Structures are given as structure tokens and as C-alpha cells.
């Protein structure tokens, strides 16, 4: 059984990583947290797991196959480099770092050390995304020319967490949180992004809580990617426009669905294909986030663990390059070319 060391046991560590690690059949052998309440939660949730105070102590635990960093984004660079230096395979919660240059630093360090590295892009494994990917791959809407994706919430009173309170340079803000998913999914669907135009605002938090990107892909498709924390009417989650139909998807866990007509037909379907007034439900392409950790476990026993990892960490460099360009765009109110460190403009291959 793959033995996992989990660094961090707050909302990400306990609420997201731990349950799906266990569902995937991996063993949570040790957890790093110095918070007394969280240490008690670990003891209750995983009584056989060793609990240690910090990452240094976690890396001293014998027999760990992989360390999962569910720590604040602003700590990812330092923490990932520590894990790599220790020679232990590493999963880093998205985003890999706070900017593209730091992402490249981590990826290059892992490659030099021969340490397997991947990034926790769990939303690639949501049925909502896998169904959207099927719609695109099977050309159910014909040739796609625009895809709108939104991640909107109704939080007029923001949560009091580092994500809302920290500066972007320290990992705060909605772009490093939600656009790290939205950009990744757009690139998976339509390929590298060449240019971006963005608007960024802060309505209720110290860091931004409202960001909208217009992204032009190398393929010619245009993505509209919006994340907002103060939307009283969230959605639609997806509106994909093709030459033969449109695909609408609106339901998303934890958020209100005020557009009742777009509710899924039943548990076996996800979204609708529209041709003006005609519509048909789309069967769900089954998937689960635990598949990510199943893939990690399989990769660690593969002949080439890095090649078998579920997410290429270089994908994270391009995602952060798009977000970096969006910040420049919003400041200058202009379209900005995406320059991905270590990659030629318009390409995904290494300069070397």
C-alpha cells in the first residue's frame, strides 16, 4: 500500500485530500499539524496515523512513498523544494506556486533531482468536467468557437481565512484559488493560451474576489473565465457555443441554482444540448476525484513514475503564466501575450 505523508490538516488537508486519499486506497501514514484541535481530528479520523508538528518532522518519518502538501499557497515554493531535497515524491495542492517563475523553479528542481512531482488539479476528475470534455471531444456541439466557464459564489460576508486576507504575493485572492482550476480546465479542453484580457476587482476582501478573463487559445477557441464571490445569481456554470449546438451546465456542489430550468434531468445526466428551443440531456461521463490519487499510487510503481503522474507539473507553469499575464492586463487595461517561462511563445515544448 502507498504510504502518504499529509502536510496540513485544515480545510484542504482534512476536507479535500484526506477523504479521497483514503477512498483511493492509499494509507495516510503521517500528518503534519501543530494545531491541537487538528491533531485531535487526525487521531479521530485516522487513529493509526502518526501526527507530527511540521514538514521537517514529516520528512523524518521512515517509509513514506509520497508527501502531499495541503499547506497555504504562499508556502508551496519553500515546502516543495524541501520535499524534493529530501528525495520524496511530492503532490502539491494547486497552484504549484504564486507565480510562473516560482513554478518553473520547483519543476526544474524536481527534474534535476529525479523526484516525481505532480499538482493536485482535482477538478479534472469532476463528472462536470469529464462530461464537458466528452462534449468537446465528441463534437456534440459541432466546432466550438467559445466556451464560458464560471465559478461564482454568494458570499457577501467573506470567510476569515488566509485565502481572503493574504496578498496575491502570499497566495491570497480568487485567481490563485479558482482561476487555477478554470485556466487549467480551459487549457485541457482547447490547448495553450496565447493572449489574455482581464478585469480584476476587490469588493469584500483584501485580495481580489472578482476576476474575469478573455483568453484566446492557440486553437482559435476563445474562453471566458469568471470567478466571483459576490454573485447573488451564480451561473451558468458552463455555456459552450458550437456551430451545431450550445451546451449548458449549471449545477455545482455547494452553490445555489437559481436557474431551475437548467437543473440536470436526473442523476445520470449532466447539462443540456440546446438547438434554439430544442434541447436534450447529456449523459454524465463518470469520474471521481479519488481517481487522481489512484493514478498517483499507480505512477509510483511504474517504470517511469514522473511520466505516469496524472498531472504534468509543467501544466502548472502555463496556468500561472496566464494568471500572471491577467494581472498585467488588469493593471494596464490591455490585451497581454502569455509568456510561459521555459517555453517558447505559442508552444508547450521546452526551449532546450
Image (cartoon, rainbow, N blue to C red):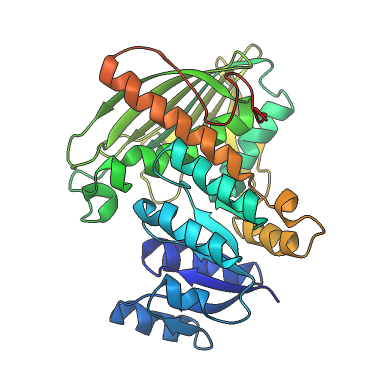
Rendering quarter of residue 187: top right
Question: Which residue shows up at 72% across the image and 29% down it?
Answer: 137
Q: Residue at image x 33%, y 47%? A: 171
Q: Is residue 46 visible?
A: yes
Q: Is residue 218 above or below residue 290?
A: above
Q: Is residue 189 left or right of residue 208?
A: right
Q: Quadrant of the N terminus?
A: bottom right
Horizontal placement of 29 versus 171: left or right? Answer: right
* Residue 181 on image: x %, y %: 48, 40
Residue 221 versus residue 127 in the image, above or below: above
Q: Position of residue 184 (x, y in %)?
A: 54, 36
Residue 309: where, in percent of width, then height? 69, 52
Above or below, 274 against 290 in this view is: above
Q: Is residue 257 visible?
A: no
**Quadrant assignment for the C terminus:** top right
123 and 134: which is toward the camera:
123
Residue 134 drawn at (x, y percent)? 69, 34
Q: Give me the residue at 23% from left, 40% from top.
A: 207
Residue in the foreground of this view, choosing between 242 and 32: 32
Question: Is 36 left or right of 309, judged from the image as shown?
Answer: left
The mark tally for this picture is 0
Residue that appears at 36% across and 67% down: 10
Q: Quadrant of residue 201?
A: top left
Amino acid at each position: 500500500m502507498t504510504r502518504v505523508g499529509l502536510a496540513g490538516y485544515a480545510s484542504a488537508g482534512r476536507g479535500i485530500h484526506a477523504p479521497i486519499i483514503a477512498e483511493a486506497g492509499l494509507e495516510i501514514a503521517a500528518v503534519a499539524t501543530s494545531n491541537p484541535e487538528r491533531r485531535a481530528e487526525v487521531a479521530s479520523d485516522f487513529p493509526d496515523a502518526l501526527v507530527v508538528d511540521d514538514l521537517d518532522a514529516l520528512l523524518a518519518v521512515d517509509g513514506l512513498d509520497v508527501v502531499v502538501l495541503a499547506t497555504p499557497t504562499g508556502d508551496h515554493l519553500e515546502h516543495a523544494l524541501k520535499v524534493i531535497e529530501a528525495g520524496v515524491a511530492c503532490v502539491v495542492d494547486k497552484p504549484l506556486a504564486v507565480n510562473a517563475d516560482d513554478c518553473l523553479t520547483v519543476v526544474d528542481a524536481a527534474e534535476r533531482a529525479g523526484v516525481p512531482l505532480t499538482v493536485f488539479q482535482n477538478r479534472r476528475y469532476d463528472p462536470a468536467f469529464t462530461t464537458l470534455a466528452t462534449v468537446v471531444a465528441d463534437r456534440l456541439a459541432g466546432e466550438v468557437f467559445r466556451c464560458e466557464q464560471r465559478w461564482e459564489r454568494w458570499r457577501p460576508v467573506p470567510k476569515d481565512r488566509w485565502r481572503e486576507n493574504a496578498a496575491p504575493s502570499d497566495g491570497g485572492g480568487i485567481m490563485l484559488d479558482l482561476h487555477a482550476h478554470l485556466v487549467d480546465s480551459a487549457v485541457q479542453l482547447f490547448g495553450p493560451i496565447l493572449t489574455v484580457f482581464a478585469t480584476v476587482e476587490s469588493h469584500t476582501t483584501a485580495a481580489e474576489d472578482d476576476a474575469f478573463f478573455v483568453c484566446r487559445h492557440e486553437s482559435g477557441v476563445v474562453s471566458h473565465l469568471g470567478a466571483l464571490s459576490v454573485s447573488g445569481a451564480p451561473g451558468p456554470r458552463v455555456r459552450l457555443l458550437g456551430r451545431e449546438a450550445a451546451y449548458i451546465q449549471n449545477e455545482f456542489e455547494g452553490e445555489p441554482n437559481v436557474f431551475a430550468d437548467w437543473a440536470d434531468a436526473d442523476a445520470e445526466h449532466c447539462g443540456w444540448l440546446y438547438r434554439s428551443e430544442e434541447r436534450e440531456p447529456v449523459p454524465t461521463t463518470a469520474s471521481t476525484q479519488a481517481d487522481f490519487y489512484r493514478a498517483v499510487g499507480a505512477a509510483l510503481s511504474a517504470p517511469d513514475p514522473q511520466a505516469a503522474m496524472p498531472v504534468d507539473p509543467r501544466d502548472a507553469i502555463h496556468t500561472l503564466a496566464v494568471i500572471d499575464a491577467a494581472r498585467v492586463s488588469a493593471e494596464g487595461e490591455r490585451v497581454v501575450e502569455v509568456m510561459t517561462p521555459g517555453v517558447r511563445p505559442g508552444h508547450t515544448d521546452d526551449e532546450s
